[in-house]
Amino acid sequence: MKTMPLAGLAAAVAFGAHAQQAPSLVSPAPTLAFQSLDAMVVTATRTPQRAGDALRDVEVITREDIDRAAPVSLAELLQRQALVEFRGTGGPGQPAGLFLRGANAGQTLVLVDGLRLSSATVGTTSIENIPLDLVERIEVVKGPLSSLYGPDAIGGVVQIFTRASATPRLFASAAYGTDSDGRLATGFTAIEGKTTVSFSAGGRTVDAPSATNERAFCHDPDRDPYDNAFANLKVVGRLAPQETLAFTGFVSRGRARFDGCPDAQGNYANDRNVQTLAAANIVSEMNYETWWKSRLTLGQGRDELQIEGGTTARFDTRQDQASWVHEFTLPAGKALAGFEMLRQKVVSDTAFSETRRDTNSAWAALSESWGSYRFEGSIRRDDDDQFGARDTGAASAGLAWPGAGLFTFTVGRGFRAPTFFDLYAPPSDFYVPNPLLRPEESLGREIGWRSESLRGWQLRLTAFDNRIEDLITYVYPTMENVRRARIRGLEASVEGRAWGVNWRGSYASQDPKDEETGFQLQGRAKRFGRLQASWGSGDWSVSGGVTASSERFDSANESPATRLPGYAIADATVRYAVSKGWSLELTGSNLFDKRYEHAVGYDAPRRAILLSLRFEAT
């Protein structure tokens, strides 16, 4: 009986589902076209499938994509490769939030090796402290996914897989660039008998310019340095022909200076955020029969924030997570049934009236294929001891029309749970918590078309309509469920090869509207996109692109004072294969040094150049 290797909750991707020879650094530029459709993914259905067969919109970002984007952050990488919006508050190490299909950062679920790492106090994941040297690949699934993943998956799911390989590998890299940006990383994968071990570690220091500008409420023109260190370990062992056991663990610690307000004498304190993200899980997979297997996961995700300087505070979140999933192979597809437990606990020197919340969940999913017809459906109940039970469901249908591509339709419900700050923060003159808040709820619909090959080109179109009700909004002096939002739009992408160059273009047009006021939703653009290209010959390869966005507003009422003008920025990478296994890369982002903002008073990163030396042996 054959068992699939594991590495964390999504082992099929980390070790098995994309088991392939590690990319050679002496090869020409990797082909952009068709790359994502041929990859194996697990996030869309919680079971391995080819990305081209998924009925949801799935984007796959590989390690090669990451290497081409060396100077940027995780948020900027997702913007380039997966058409994801984000709101950043400065440069390296400064807070950033992702917007998927117009949903805000709290309505987008981020997983790392299958585990939640979000802060329960503010409801978002500190992606600014997940270094790209820690990441092997990323899967982005857009659209409502609460029926598979529970709270917060209104806009979709971003799942990050840490470094690992299905074959023996040794790698190392060193880089230096603008603002004294120094980076080191190394790692290996070793296989001995029935055991696979993957380890990676690294760090970064950068003397970044001030995160704020003159438009900020508090602006200190000094520099805001950032440093980070990380380590990651994965161990997979086959205990018996029918049983596999895996351990996954990582830790990432970042320290970022930020601008506080001056004291009465006009002196600025050296305020600093010290943030640690950590996660560990154990996964046991058992194959009972050729048609039945189960996967038991026990894990914990931690977000620990310590604020130092003129202001001091501590906010720690611990999320204990357990999952037991049964997978059944059917004549025409697969069925899944799962049970989950999530315990969120807050430890803080701020006196929250409640510090623990438990959610127990049960869900089921079905995927079937009959000739050219495909179907995926899922239902889920989440029982929260604070707001009670919530039922969600989703269904997708597809028609693979010979010669015409794949037509898809999806409808699904989602919800977002209130944060501990919304519910239990200590009262003040300006804020009173509201323990009676209801979860935000959504109904999302999508119609899509995808052509795997049309005269050598791959095309994709998706129209979406997402309605969100009971939006949690500050109405002095508390948070209330008072608003509704609707985000309608169209996403398009094209990939192919012409004139010896690989091309990829993506574009989104949307109307993110507050239905109560008619105003544009805060932080969302109506149009954004990217065009990129790559070319390779012999030992040389070149890639580059342009990312553009229309104007946004950093307020709920389109105040002219909060208008953020549109922008277009360019990036490029040149790679030279020095010898077998060795390569030099020169990468640059924001090449024309465009000054722009994602949030009022916070400059986006300016021009950055990075020279990298890489080694890889397989």
Image: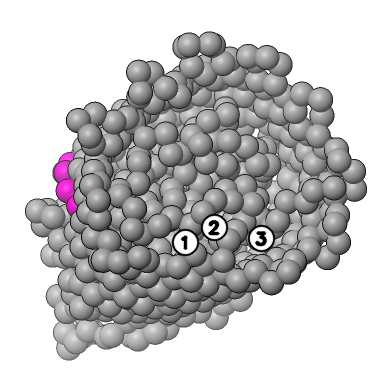
| Residue under label 3 | 8
Residue 275 percent location from the top left of the image: 46, 75
Q: From the image, tell me which residue sits under label 2.
A: 161
Q: Are marks 2 and 1 in contact (CB under 8 Å)?
A: yes
Direction from residue 304 to residue 115 in the image, left or right: right
Q: Disc 2 or 1, which lies upstream in sequence?
A: 1
Q: Which mark is residue 461?
A: none
Mark 1 lies on residue: 135
State yes or no: discs 3 and 1 in contact (Cβ < 8 Å): no
Report the residue at 25% width, 55% height from top.
539
Q: Is residue 508 visible?
A: no
| Above or below for 342 versus 443 | below
Residue range highlighted in magenta: 562-572
Callout 2 touching callout 3 (CB < 8 Å): yes
Q: Residue at x 19, y 87 (%)?
A: 267
* Mark 2 to mark 3 CA distance (whole Å): 9 Å
Residue at the spot 86% in from the left edge and 61% down from the top edge: 240
Secondary structure predominantly adopted by residues drawn in magenta: strand
